[in-house]
């Protein structure tokens, strides 16, 4: 029994464990979809400069509206995601998890529900629980694409207040096409109308263009992004959304005052100055991801087509035993609890080689 159960915690939190991928000290860590490349040294120096400047005014609260940062994020999206947005359409928070939490605080909450199509990013359900929002698990086909007909039916029947669409989907890597998003949006509008949140945390790694242009003329469609993956800045904690300006107004009703520290804003602005260099790493990771898919198939694995910086592979009779075997070889991958499947993040070429060697050995053993 968790020690917290001795306290008067909310009923729905009793007996629950916190979210947590193991943070183990092993030679090859490919379990949390991090970018394996440290930030380039010139960027590290630029961060130090910007943070030094910010430190001079740390006696003051930061810019509560993060105007400069939102302007630069809007410029980045406009340049790279196929649609012009400005700062009034962009909001930023401490990681996209906080963005998602603010969205559920504003649009979910007690007496309301959210739906996701599972298996998907487990935090969607956990943030729903944390914000008192009911959770509905929607269907996928066996190949992990969204079963649109069934999804539309569930939305019509259950009338959720928030619909999560994760594209590319974690943990399967599956991209969602624009037609599917539009079908879900239409269903959500006739059911309620409700908010549809596209979680595009891995958008930059996709073979397909961003779904950002879909926000045009759809005031209840939100696109969520992060600097944790493509920007190689998971430690920074910076996520953002793009949507109709009214959505940005709504999340301001629930955000804590001065939620985004001056140090965070300064660091994120420095990283945005290095977009070109960082996106070159993304290209490298995309080709490593494609190599993982090819080599895993050659090694006899089943692989789900991936548009993210990770690959879902299997199938194992006992995926947890297979996970353990790889760990014993010094390679940490992720067991997301999808029966038969494991997930590996694309690392450096050397890390991926070590992983592939371990898999070849694994496939000679029976799991
Ligand atoms: N969405 C998805 C689909 C993710 O996989 C993750 C991180 N694993 C996040 C959001 C949250 O990322 P962050 O809070 O670091 O932006």
Image (cartoon, rainbow, N blue to C red):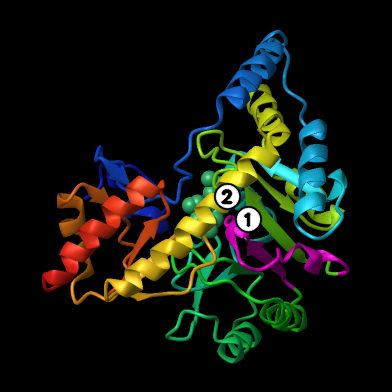
Neighbor class of circle 1 (other Cα within 10 Å; few <14, some 14-19, many 20+) is: many
Residue 361 coordinates in the image, percent (x, y): 16, 63
Q: Which residues are magenta?
A: 194-217
Quarter holding residue 356: bottom left
Residue 349 falls within the magenta-colored stretch: no
Compared to residue 44, the image places residue 170 above or below, namely below
Q: Is residue 203 above or below residue 190?
A: above
In-image side of 69 versus 173 (left or right): right
Marker disc for residue 204: 1
- Picture coordinates of residue 334, whole percent (x, y): 32, 57
Q: CA distance from mark 1 to mark 2?
A: 7 Å
- Residue at 27% in and 71% down: 299
Rendered residue at 39%/62% (across/down): 292
From the viewer's side, name the closer residue of 19 and 335.
335
Q: Are the residues flagged by discs 1 and 2 in contact, CB closer than 8 Å? A: yes
**Ligand 1 contact, mark 1 (Cβ < 8 Å):** no
Question: Horizontally, is 86 left or right of 238 in the view?
Answer: right
**From the Cβ of disc 2, is ligand 1 less than 8 Å away?**
no
Q: Is residue 309 visible?
A: no
Q: Is residue 196 magenta?
A: yes
Q: Secondary structure at mark 1?
A: helix
The C terminus: image quadrant: bottom left
Residue 345, image quadrant: bottom left
Q: Which mark is residue 304?
A: none
């Amino acid at each position: 029994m968790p020690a917290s159960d001795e306290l008067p915690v909310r009923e729905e939190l009793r007996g629950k464990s916190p979210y947590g991928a193991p943070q183990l000290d092993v030679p090859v860590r490919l379990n949390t979809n991090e970018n394996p490349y440290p930030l380039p040294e010139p960027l590290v120096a630029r961060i130090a400069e910007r943070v030094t400047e910010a430190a001079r005014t740390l006696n003051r609260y930061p810019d509560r509206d993060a105007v400069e940062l939102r302007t630069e994020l809007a410029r980045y999206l406009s340049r790279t995601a196929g649609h012009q947005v400005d700062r009034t359409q962009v909001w930023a928070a401490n990681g996209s998890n906080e963005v998602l939490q603010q969205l559920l605080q504003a649009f979910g909450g007690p007496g309301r529900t959210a739906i996701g199509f599972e298996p998907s990013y487990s935090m969607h359900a956990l943030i729903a629980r944390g914000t008192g929002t009911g959770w509905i698990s929607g269907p996928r086909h066996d190949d992990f694409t969204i079963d649109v007909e069934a999804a539309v039916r569930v939305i019509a029947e259950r009338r959720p207040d928030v619909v999560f669409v994760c594209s590319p989907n974690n943990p399967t890597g599956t991209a969602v096409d624009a037609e599917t998003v539009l079908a879900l949006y239409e269903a959500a509008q006739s059911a309620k109308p409700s908010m549809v949140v596209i979680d595009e945390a891995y958008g930059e790694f996709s073979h397909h263009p961003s779904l950002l242009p879909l926000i045009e003329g759809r005031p209840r469609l939100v696109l969520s992004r992060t600097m944790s993956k493509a920007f190689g800045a998971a430690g920074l904690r910076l996520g953002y959304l793009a949507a109709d300006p009214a959505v940005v107004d709504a999340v301001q009703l629930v955000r804590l005052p001065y939620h985004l520290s001056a140090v965070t804003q300064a660091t994120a602005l420095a990283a945005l100055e290095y977009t070109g260099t960082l996106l070159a790493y993304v290209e490298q990771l995309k080709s490593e991801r494609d190599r993982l898919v090819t080599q895993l198939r050659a090694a006899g694995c089943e692989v789900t087509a991936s548009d993210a910086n990770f690959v879902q592979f299997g199938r194992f009779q006992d995926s947890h035993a297979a996970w353990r075997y790889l760990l014993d070889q010094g390679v940490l991958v992720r067991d997301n609890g999808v029966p038969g499947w494991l997930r590996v993040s694309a690392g450096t070429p050397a890390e991926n080689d070590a992983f592939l060697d371990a898999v070849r050995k694994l496939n000679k053993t029976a799991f």
